[in-house]
Image: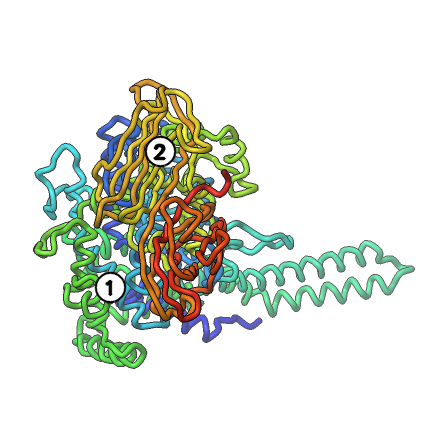
Amino acid sequence: MKIPFPSLIRAQLAACLFLTVLGVSLPAWAWKPITHVYLAEKAREELLAQNGYVSLNQVDFHNRQLLGPLGTWQVSAPIYQALRDYPEYFRAGVLGPDAYPDILFGQGVIHPATDDDGSDSDPWLRHLYSKASTPQQRAFVMGFLTHAAGDMFAHTLVNHYAGGPFDVTTPSNVKRHLATEGHVGRRTPFLGDVSINNPDNDNKPEGVPARYTIDTSAVNTFIYDNMIDARRSRDGRSGNKVWQLTQGTLPNSVPRIFTELRAGLEDKIHGYYGYVEWLRQQYRENWDRCTFYRPNACRKALEYKALLLAYRFINGLPTSYVEAWVRDIDRGLQAWPATSTKVARALFMQTNHKADTESEDHGAKAVIFTYAEDHLCSMSGAPDAQCRLSATVRRFLAEIINITLFDELKDDILNFMVDKATGEDLDYWKGLMDPEPYQVNQEVPANPPSPLTSSEQLDRLMGIPVSGNAADRFNTYAFAPAYNTYTAIKMSFLDTRAQWHSVIGTTGWTPANLDVLMDTYDAPNGFNGQLMLGFMRSMDWDNQWALPKQSLLSRNCHVFNRFFMQQTGDLWESTDPDEQAYLNRWCKEGGNKFTYQGFGSKYAVREIPLLEGETLTLGTCGVNGASGFGDTRLTLMTPWGTQAAYNDNACGGSLSNFTYTVPPGAGGMYQLRANCAGLFSFCGGTVVWTIGGSFSYSASNTSTATVSTTNRELPLVGGQRLQVGTCGVPGSWGSGDTFLRLSKTGQSEVAINDNACGGSQSYLEYVVPQDTLGTHLLRAGCASSNSCSGTVSYLLTDASL
């Protein structure tokens, strides 16, 4: 019987262990692991300080500012008790697939989508969440969910600066990821900073050392059973869940290599016992038929008996060897979670935020070498005695000769290999994981047209002054991706539909079919109360809360914008036409109107782009199609967060209406806030508005408005009706033969007009399609090579009215 251990598996094993031992694997981190832990601890600290309650705030989405609390919600007792009593397990879970079941498995299987040879992230999150039953398991899995929350916001920022998701085949992409992530990691506060009641601990490494502890001793079996122990079915069915989730992924980690190997060995064991049982059955059947009158049955019985004895004699001992081999693999894989925890302590959970790879007893290399000596030799099929001898010989040699020379040679070989593969040596890559600002500036392009370097831009985003020093740490409430992560983590502590009915109700979004929406969410699974389930394809991609699937909270863009801040790299900054169209469909509910209902001072919001000189007329009354009930109140905020206009009572009652003209230099994205005037009042309605503007021009030789034109860029959204002309719109006039063209910027024309209003003036009307978003270019010129002049006036209304 041949005992297989293919060279490919040996090569994969050697490669993955070599990288793991030397600490040079290049994970697609979004937040560094310690940043994940800091934000998770900050959320847990609030939960404890508020005796089992979490608070959620409303924000000014575009200006990235807190506006005040929306309310507090009680966390269910099982989750509160798990997070309160088992923080070490929670923190271990927060490291997520960056540590469990190990970094290579997490980065190669759990992080990526099936498109990238992974298995999709959400099925793993659902699987772990459904299996947690003890308080320690629950704490660990809640931590795992917070890791996913952090990745979806952090990768939106990091992918923006890196030029796309992590791609190990592109050195420039890898450099940008490592430099950006490393810079944020350097700016991460120490864990002493999370204490709400002890602000003096800010940024001190010694703050609260206990917060740097992790433990998985009571969940190692849980991790093994639900993340490692992939077993193929023997009855033709699909097998256990871990087997299902790992099929089609690359075998590039200890669990993947050895579960695949074990499956092949178990096939051989199963085949051996199956054939033995078949021979026994044939022997029994023929022996039962054996009589003096049936000599053939007797002969066959003896033949099958002889075959059975021979087969067992030839294959029994090799099969026993294979069975012992499988037991060695089982023991090694069962020991893997504890090893991963030791590695994680060394790499991620040091109080100085530096990885410990070299410590003699507890460094990452020592942990991996110990595991290799204890398990990998026998897991690879060698007899236990030989493995024990190999480990003894290694220790003996270490005592009598200076094997540092061999280590140096190994490092020289590795440097050569890395340099040839990437163009940089090993020290460069290690340094890039904890980069100086000049390295960030060297590898990461800055966003134009800012004069700041990329490290300065990142510091500014983190709430750190450009003139700050190296010891400055990010401000969670100013750094949008960190704040969004912090908020999503607190939301992940809620786990019932009733809680989410209450949370969503504070935003003014109260659809009558909310339960139906929950029932059909992520069909056929439905919404079970855990916000982090049901939508995440990949922890490596950006904008995962909206694309390609939506979280429950993202089903309404304006509700999402009440809780989370706009951040660099998200859909609002995208120049991709498909993403712009998606954003328009997602966030705009008709060109110039929206419906809300609310209670008291909590308000709904809508962004309205305005140009200088434009006049906005808006209301729940006094505008065609507007309506309302109760005592409505409308407030318009400028792009820089100050009040531009306000109205409480209008139209002879308690509804609202106002007109506002944008001053010179004050164009931009304005924010409409709609709420109720009374502290305990209930109100709502449909807010409708019109936008009017104009510009004058004089031109000649414009070649039918194709050259030397006077232009106006108009920010249009789907569902608007644009009426524009040198006639037919209030305030317009013209002289000569005017000509107008309208196009989507950089694309083809959508409307043109030469002669209208019974003469040589121009007028056109255009309804913006619902899937359109962005700047349109209006060009004013003259027909042919003539001369002309006039005032172009335009009016934007809602196309449905």
* Viewer can see residue 40: yes
Q: Quadrant of residue 696?
A: bottom left
Give coordinates of residue 49: x percent, y percent: 22, 29
Where 412 falls versus 793 (above or below)? below
> Which structural element holds mark 2?
strand
- Relative side of 312 to 336, left or right: right
Q: Residue at position x 35%, y 37% from top?
A: 617
Image quadrant containing the N terminus: bottom right
- Relative side of 290 to 269, left or right: right
Q: Residue at position x 29%, y 31% from top?
A: 54
Give coordinates of residue 417: x percent, y percent: 29, 79
Q: Quadrant of residue 565?
A: top left
Q: Which residue is mark 1?
A: 448
Where 71 falls versus 550 (above or below)? above
Give coordinates of residue 240: x percent, y percent: 54, 50
Q: Nearer the viewer, residue 48 or 754?
A: 754
Residue 604 is marked as: 2
The residue type indicated by label 2 comes to Ala
Give coordinates of residue 178: x percent, y percent: 26, 63
The residue type indicated by label 1 comes to Pro
Residue 199 is marked as: none
Of all residues shown, which one is farthest toward the right? 293
Q: Nearer the viewer, residue 335 or 62?
A: 62
* Viewer can see residue 771: no
**Disc 1 and disc 2: Cα gap in Å?**
33 Å
Q: Residue at position x 84%, y 62% from top?
A: 297
